[in-house]
Image (cartoon, grey):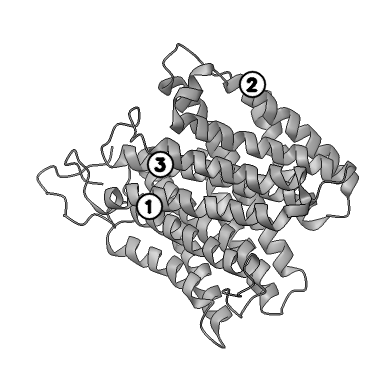
Amino acid sequence: MLQIDPRTPPPSFALFQLGFRPFFSGAALFGITAVGLWMATYVFGRDATPASLPPVVWHGHEMVFGYTMAVVAGFLLTAVSNWTGQPSLKGPSLAVTFALWLGARAAFYVPGKGLWLAAAADLAFLCVLFYGVARPVLRVRQWKQVGILAKLVLMLAASATFYAGALGYLADGIQWGLYGGLYLILALVFMMARRVVPFFIERGVDEDFVPRNRRWLDIASLFGVLVWAVFEVFLPGQTMVIGLLSLALFCMHALRLVDWHTPGIWRKPLLWSLFLGYGALVAGFGLRVLSVWGEVSPFIALHAFAYGGIGMVTLGMMSRVALGHTGRNVFSPPPAIRWFLALLAAGALSRVLLPLLDGAHYTLWIGLSQALWILAFAHFAIIYLPMLARPRIDGRPG
């Protein structure tokens, strides 16, 4: 067990006491900023993105390696202590890790050498993050976490590949790195969702319910996503195979949703947000099938994964984790939580569904989805930033 001296009073400023605090704060504020800059560029035609990258490439990179990796870092640096009973990064070491992440976001705007600076900071951040997660895991030889460590190594490789392409050293580096990073995030989300979502549902609903988990589905879906991602990144011309794999994954993950569903979910915003996020990931596979054998743009499927799936799951997880780790009751969250989660769900519909129904107003629906994203994260920030900066309300460290 993690040994903490109860006689040591927690500091009044607790931002760097545990990984979720700075990284969830940074993810929320950067999520607002990055989408705001993209909105100014895409909707209003005023290029607010850095000159070091094409606007659409910067947008994709920063939502994957900026926003989402901040959430991943905050979650893993917090969860690894619970998993292993060992301390993770805190205090100055955590502050340096956060500074590397933040520095990479700012470096893109440095004239001349911005890409080099961003690459150095981003790669250093991922190396330190790997160290922060791997050290406690290896100390207690908790080998069941090797899959997570492997994904962090692959994220480092994807980031290096992206920068090799952006700096002109690898012809397909931008595409490989960006899509590889996105699909690694998807694989990580599926892995973590399998661990926590059925547990949260069983503990969180008012009725007696035990979600069903099928061993064959766990194995088949895990390897199916990895094979699908390899084809998507390196063999995008194999559309028949991609379509069949997408169909198989759609069916498998839809079955998992059926196995996890109970009506009590819809009375609990911290549950229905995760369930809807997982449903958006399932819809992403279905839309990918339609992009192969229909007339749906593959970018619609991409944003079902990214905005609907990753966006909803990460905001729902940040909302729950921050409550629990600041000493608050996760079964009685602030009422306002349902509103910002509903705003983000509406934004996902605007980004994915409305362009399908009314393509003539495509830019309008994109702009609406961006505005709803900003409103949702601004609402989250107003409620949660004070929690994240202050000590736990129960007086415990962390």
On screen, residue 271 versus residue 158, left or right, reads left
Labelled disc at residue 319: 3
| Front residue of 94 and 210 | 210
In this view, the residue in front, 157 or 36, is 36
Q: Which of pointers 2 and 1 indicates the residue nearer the eye? A: 1
Q: Is residue 86 visible?
A: yes
Q: Position of residue 136 (x, y in %)?
A: 39, 48
Rendered image quadrant of residue 177: bottom right
Q: Which numbered disc covers residue 258? A: 2
Q: Quadrant of the N terminus?
A: top left
Instruction: Report which residue position mark 1 lands on.
Output: 381
Q: Is residue 297 left or right of residue 276?
A: right
Can the viewer see residue 187 in this picture? no
* Kind of residue at badge 3: Ser
Residue 206 x/y as whole percent: 41, 16
Q: Residue at x 78, y 43 (%)?
A: 288
Q: Secondary structure at mark 1?
A: helix
Amino acid carrying label 1: it is Ala
Crowding at mark 2 (Cα within 10 Å: few <14, some 14-19, many 20+): few
First of labels 2, 3 by sequence position? 2
| Residue located at (61% from left, 75% from top) | 47
Q: Quadrant of residue 82?
A: top left
